[in-house]
Amino acid sequence: MDIDHSVIHMYEQLMNNNSNKTLQSTSNTSVAQSLNNSTLCNNDHNKVDFNTNTSENNNTPNNQLSQSNENHESTEDIIEILNIQTNNEPKLIKINQINTDIDFPWKLQAIISCTHPKRTYINSNGEGEISTWDLVDDTGAINLVAFNLDSYILLNKLFEGKSYEFNGLSIKTVDSIYKKLSHDYQLIVNKTTKIRDITMAFKYQLTYNFTHLNEVENLPLNSIIDVNVKVLRDYGTTTGSTNGNSWTRREVHVSQDQVHMKLTLWNEQAKKIPTSIINKEIKLKNIKIDWFNGSRTLVSLANSYLSIV
């Protein structure tokens, strides 16, 4: 069938109009989507800037938290970082926990149970002085040592029977020759040390952990022990002076269940009982195992306690 050319022209014009409308609609949709995306991007950009500004105004841990997030660290890692950096308060520990492996800030609360006599010394650097105290809590005892100016100051600050909190002390292994307590370590005062008076619920009472004389031969030299013995002989006292330090010595012979041993009492312990102690039963705390003339002996220390049973 032949179609009139005018009809064909009208049809083509109609199709062109519909095509233009479709293109315009599509274009409008694309423009709208672009505008929406642009708005979202602007909003997101504003959020980042806000958080950044807020973060900059916050404290250091929050800044480091943001940085940790940027580094894709886990929540556990972030918490650990914050705990390390914000938990600078020294941890309260007990005497039996003290050792050189401690790698965190710590403090100690203890009672002064004994003030040792001040000692002086001379070396290549000149003269000096050393002061030593016994610290006790409900877990044990340990020595506190101060040198020179620290010694001079603390002798007028620390008193027997008083309780204190110590912060910033150094921990040092004790040379067995200089041991005064059974603890393997001692505490040294330094320029960062802080000490304050406190009140403790713990009340110190002298207790004994007796070692039988027949065990002494098997213990290391310089061990610190408690004994309960009978005095067989009392050789009296002698006095003298070494390096400007005066001393008093008393030699006695003791036994326990047919085991005999020499005991040397020094200074306060030597003078404590002015009369003869022959046939007396005595108990002693903090006695050192020593070596003299090829045999083991017992020696009292400044912090030894002597009493007649």
Image: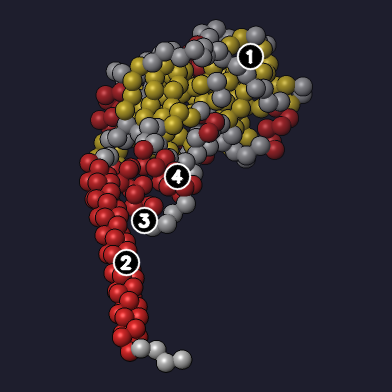
Residue 143 in view, yes or no: no
Residue marked by disc 4: 80
Q: Is residue 156 left or right of residue 269?
A: left
Query: Which quadrant holds the C terminus?
Result: top right
Whether 199 is drawn above or below 109: the answer is: above
Amino acid at circle 1:
Ile
Residue marked by disc 2: 25
- Identify the residue at the far bottom of this view: 2
Q: Which residue occupies 59% across, 38% down?
A: 221
Q: Residues within 10 Å of mark 1 (few under 14, many from 20)?
A: some
Amino acid at circle 3:
Glu
Please tell me which of labels 4 and 2 falls first in the chain. Answer: 2
Where residue 14 sits in the image (x, y, percent)?
32, 76
The mark closer to the camera, 1 or 3, is 3
* Mark pair 4, 2: CA separation: 57 Å
For residue 70, the mark is 3
Residue marked by disc 1: 282
Q: Which residue occupies 28% across, 32% down?
A: 148
The mark closer to the camera, 4 or 2, is 2
Q: Which residue occupies 41% across, 16% down?
A: 163
* Mark pair 2, 1: CA separation: 112 Å
Please tell me which of labels 1 and 3 falls first in the chain. Answer: 3
Where residue 269 sits in the image (x, y, percent)?
50, 17
Please tell me which of labels 1 and 4 falls first in the chain. Answer: 4
Please tell me which of labels 2 and 1 falls first in the chain. Answer: 2
Q: Nearer the viewer, residue 234 or 221?
A: 221
Q: Quadrant of residue 194?
A: top left
Where residue 213 sits in the image (x, y, percent)?
70, 27
Please tell me which of labels 3 and 2 falls first in the chain. Answer: 2
